[in-house]
Image (tube, helix red, strand yellow):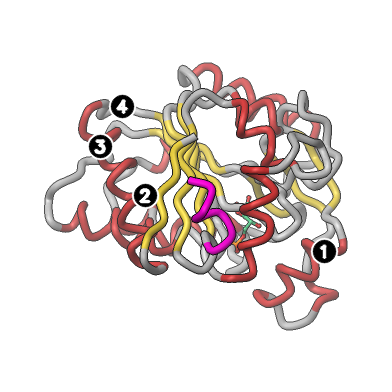
Amino acid sequence: MNFIIAKDYDAMGRAAATIVAAKVLTKPNAVLGLATGSTPISLYKELVALYKKGELDFSNIKSFNLDEYVGLPPTNDQSYIYFMKDNLFDHINIKKENYHVPNGNSSNLEDEAKHYEKMIKDAGGIDIQVLGIGPNGHIGFNEPDTKFEKVTHETGLTESTIEANKRFFNKKEDVPTKAITMGIKTIMMAKSIIILATGKGKADIVKSAFFGDIVPSVPASILQLHHNVTVIVDTEAGEKIKKHI
Ligand code: F6R
């Protein structure tokens, strides 16, 4: 694993953007795996800025998001498709038919999950997967003790994730309790991975995920076995790993 400790949140986003931009420049038809949440916003801001300066062209880029809540309409500003359009897709020249977010409103979520997995495969697999990490070590919505061999599937959210995500909703009861997510196997099949973390609230999980045991109770710990992972954290999230790298 490679580690980058950036001085703050914006520098973390810039470091991540450099890696994504290098891929977009060297492989104009690359397939990106994308995440939502507060962590990657500075990355997306930087990618939009590079696009606006004329330095990046997304016209042949494809993307697949990690996950989506079940049951939120795409017009709900907390749905992940809304988030992605708002923070990235509506500001760059990626084609509508080339970006994908799982459909959490499908009447058959099992078929939707299979179809999503097949689309990733048919696109040639993910070149760079962007990840955040939950305070409980989840990646995507693969909560602690999810089997490492799972591909895209429907899942329930744990109490700790509902608690962590309620800040985005009016009240806790509004947080959806289910989601559709790429599985850990889907994530591990990506050719390269960048995982980002910001703030002191992530310092403990960053240490246990990347310097602790590889165990299903810490889903992100499996990334220690991937051949091409870059961990990019800000000073606060990196506080407990700095002496180990
Ligand atoms: C988002 C996702 C989640 C988040 C994680 C961290 O698509 O899959 O795993 O990356 O919950 O969220 P933030 O960035 O809001 O702390």
Three-letter code, disc 1: Ser
Residue assigned mark 4 = 29
Across and down, in percent, residue 244 comes to 53, 48
Q: CA distance from mark 2 to mark 1?
A: 27 Å
Q: Count of labels shown?
A: 4
Q: CA distance from mark 3 to mark 2?
A: 10 Å
Across and down, in percent, residue 209 comes to 67, 45
Residue lying at 57% horizontally and 26% vertically, measured from the top left: 226
Across and down, in percent, residue 109 comes to 78, 37
Three-letter code, disc 4: Asn
Left or right: 181 as drawn, with respect to 41: right
Residue assigned mark 1 = 160
Which residues make up the magenta segment?
239-245
Residue assigned mark 2 = 16
Question: In the rendered structure, are the residues bearing label 1 and label 3 in contact, judged by CB atoms less than 8 Å apart?
Answer: no
Among the two numbered marks 2 and 1 on one chain, the one whose residue lies closer to the N terminus: 2
